[in-house]
Image (spheres, rainbow, N blue to C red):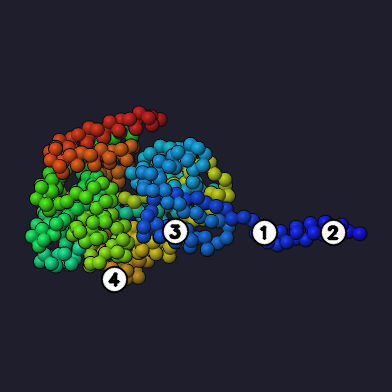
Amino acid sequence: MKSPFLSLSATAMALALVSAPAHAQVEVQWWHSMGGALGEWVNDLAKDFNTSQTAYKVVPTFKGNYDESMTAAIAAFRAGNAPHILQVFEVGTATMMASKGAIVPVAKIMADAGVPFDPKAYVPAVAGYYTAPNGQMLSFPFNSSTTVFHYNKDAFKAAGIDAENPPKTWPEVTLAAAKLKASGHKCPFTTSWVSWTQLESFSAWHNVEFATKGNGMRGNDARLAFNTPLHVRHIENLANMSKQGLFVYKGRGNAADATFVSGECAMTTGSSALYGNIKRNAKFASGISTLPYYPDVPGAPQNTVIGGASLWVMSGKKAEEYKGVAQFFAHLSKTEEAVKSHQRTGYLPVTIASYEATEKSGFYKQNPGTDVSVTQMIRKTTDKSRGIRLGNFVQIRTIVDEEMENIWSGKKTAQEGLDSAVKRGNEQLERFEKANKS
């Protein structure tokens, strides 16, 4: 007679086999810095990928702003529990490139997984920034932005300014700001990311160096060079606008973004990716135009530099997990996915095909200004405008913020503040060069 325990065990085992999946999903941890509307976009990207297949599950986790997520990832890597994918802003690129043992090049990830990957499919100005001197793409170009000029069309009309013909030059910005102030606007012009918009992109847009060695693209021995007469003239003009109440400084990082979206400030220079927030939350008609320039500078305007972030793959993971990463990147690169992301957020299209598809669809004609970031970035670059890739760049930007605040408050002249920023910043570059001698 069979034991009832054997029968029960056999039944339980059969049930377990029926209910258990053929193989468990492989989880891929993704740490990011996207909050608000952009955070919802990131969650949707992961959800779309997860529902498109059953082998892998991407788990996005918000880790604070870019500085905070990078710091958290470094600590996690040392503790042996880093995520598979880390979103790193462009300022951290040189640091990540120097962290050879901590990262696995995206080109290697794709090749090892047998997933087709052609760097030439991506927008050159974007892909080139994240590519090593040997031609290997190191990180995945995810959310790339550039600096543009956002303006409040309703405020322009109220001030008697042509809302369909926004200022293209800095003298025109000053004139528009004066009219806005006269019409009662308390914050005619502001800016976010002061170093990025007013020095880094400003330099490339005028085809002058921000730093030597092709802005650091040709080596770690680069030194800062943004205290020239042109840079001093521009910062001096902004300081004078500040004294007159035409330019209102709203703080570091992207603090100024909220003041534009709320309608408090009528004009701002900031990220093209602010478009998604404006479209969703602004209660006024808005426009996007090119970054202002000085018309008497030969060669201006040239092209603006990259902003935003890319996705880096951390080392020390299993081969099966890396296959999941490769599949996720392939999913993000699909033309229809890249088109949706570009049109939803205002970030640059990741691939050339997604740009062409967006143009063909009539999106740019239906949403004037949304192509500004693309046209600013796809122009032919020069040695002075290809991008800025410096070591200890996070610290350098903090130094620039400190010195700019000294200028806005009148504690230092434009020349004194920029000279000090260059001197202090070069100390950071020397430190980085010393630490990364090959």
Q: Which residue position is annotated with label 3?
A: 43
Q: Closer to the N terminus: mark 1 or mark 2? A: 2
Measured Cα–Cα span from mark 3 to mark 1: 27 Å
Secondary structure of the residue carrying tag 1 is: loop
Height in image: 390 above or below 111? above
Measured Cα–Cα span from mark 3 to mark 4: 27 Å
Q: Closer to the N terminus: mark 2 or mark 3? A: 2
How many numbered discs sit on the rendered protein? 4
Height in image: 344 above or below 84? below
**Mark 1 crowdedness (10 Å alpha carbons): few <14, some 14-19, many ≥20:** few
Q: Which residue position is annotated with label 1?
A: 20
Secondary structure of the residue carrying tag 2 is: helix
Q: Which residue position is annotated with label 4?
A: 366
In the image, which is nearer the foreground, mark 2 or mark 4? 2
Q: Residue 254 in the image: x percent, y percent?
A: 28, 51
In the image, which is nearer the foreground, mark 3 or mark 4? 3
Q: Closer to the N terminus: mark 3 or mark 4? A: 3
Between 111 and 395, the one nearer to me in the picture: 395
Q: Which residue position is annotated with label 2?
A: 4
